[in-house]
Image (tube, rainbow, N blue to C red):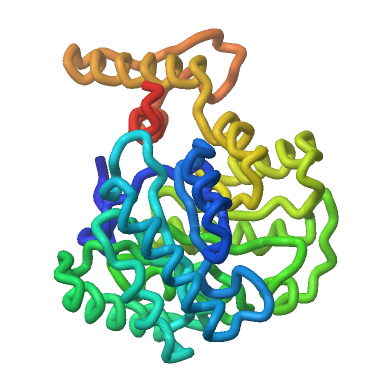
Amino acid sequence: MKTDPFMTDRLPMLPLRSVLFVASTNSSAIDAAMHSGADALIIDMEEPQSPMNEGVRERARHIVHEVISSAPPAGTPGSPRLFCRVQAPRTGQMSKDLRAILHPSLYGVVVPKSYGPDDIVAADAVLTNAEAEAGLLLGGIALYPILETAPALRRAFDIAMASPRVAYLGGAISRFGDIHQAVGYRWTPASSETFVLRSNVLIDARAAGIRYPISGMWGGPTLDFEGFRGFATELRDLGYYGMMISYHEHVALAHEVFTPAPADVAYWKELVALGDDAEQTGTGPILHGDPGQGEAHVVHGAHIESARLNLEWATALGVA
């Protein structure tokens, strides 16, 4: 496997097909989300409701502390990876949230409303101090910047490169909210208004070595499953490996879209086997299938390396 040419010490990354948001102020909703089957949860401590006064925040911190403290260690098979969206470092309140949640079961911290790499450097510093206070391994908790401002969308590559903790990245595309205000688009079910944003962020993320970029969110009705499927499929076609979601009803469908099909896995295995055999015997060219299928008939090194990467993805998901 080729290493990241920019940041080889970046935290390990695994594909997350579904990243489910849940309010930190609702303990029953968090419990339901823990059993939803989602690959990851984002417990929202930044703005789970309005208003968010200090009394509400203290209650949320208590709820999340209880959840995090009783959860299995991060990476336990069968358990969702737990992220918490905390207040941005520029508020001066991030450390208060971190003190309530730092525990071996916490996988990552979601950084909201970044404007550039300085915000991520600051978040890394605050998190490092908090890890030291909690007696945790320094640098072990991931950062997941959500791009919700126009400057962040424009500087996604720099944001991803600002810290080796940044393991995931994606635009927080949604019907409402901060990114809608920042850009001013008008949401449509076809989502063509955010296509360029999603494409640009994807390239920046991959250029920075983010192996499994994540995007979001479906802005249509919860029960419009065909609309959701179409949006999720377009994300996968673009190169995303998962998406942020707001409803349990979408978990299974997100997993269906962002999991490679058995036929694809079999095809990738065939290409790798053909490539390995050719390397051992020194014979070629490598041919596969009907000559009428065009480029795919003559198998080159790039095809084989792509197949290896795809098999790595499938293996990480347990389907290869």
* Left or right of 180 on screen, residue 257: left
Residue at (66%, 42%) from the top-left corner? 232
Q: Please tell me in which quadrant of the rendered image residue 101 appears.
A: bottom left
* Left or right of 81 on screen, residue 178: right
Q: Please tell me in which quadrant of the rendered image residue 121 appears.
A: bottom left
Q: Toward the viewer: 270 or 80? A: 80
Vertical placement of residue 288 versus 127, above or below? above
Total labels: the figure holds 0
> Residue 234 at x, y = what percent?
67, 42
Q: Can see residue 313?
A: yes
Which residue lies most toward the top here?
290
Q: Quadrant of the C terminus?
A: top left
Q: Can see residue 156?
A: no
> Residue 35 at x, y = what percent?
49, 39
Residue at (70%, 79%) from the top-left corner? 182
> Residue 273 at x, y = what percent?
30, 15
Q: Toward the viewer: 16 or 212? A: 16
> Residue 200 at x, y = what percent?
59, 62
Residue at (57%, 60%) from the top-left corner? 26
Residue at (23%, 77%) from the top-left corner? 128
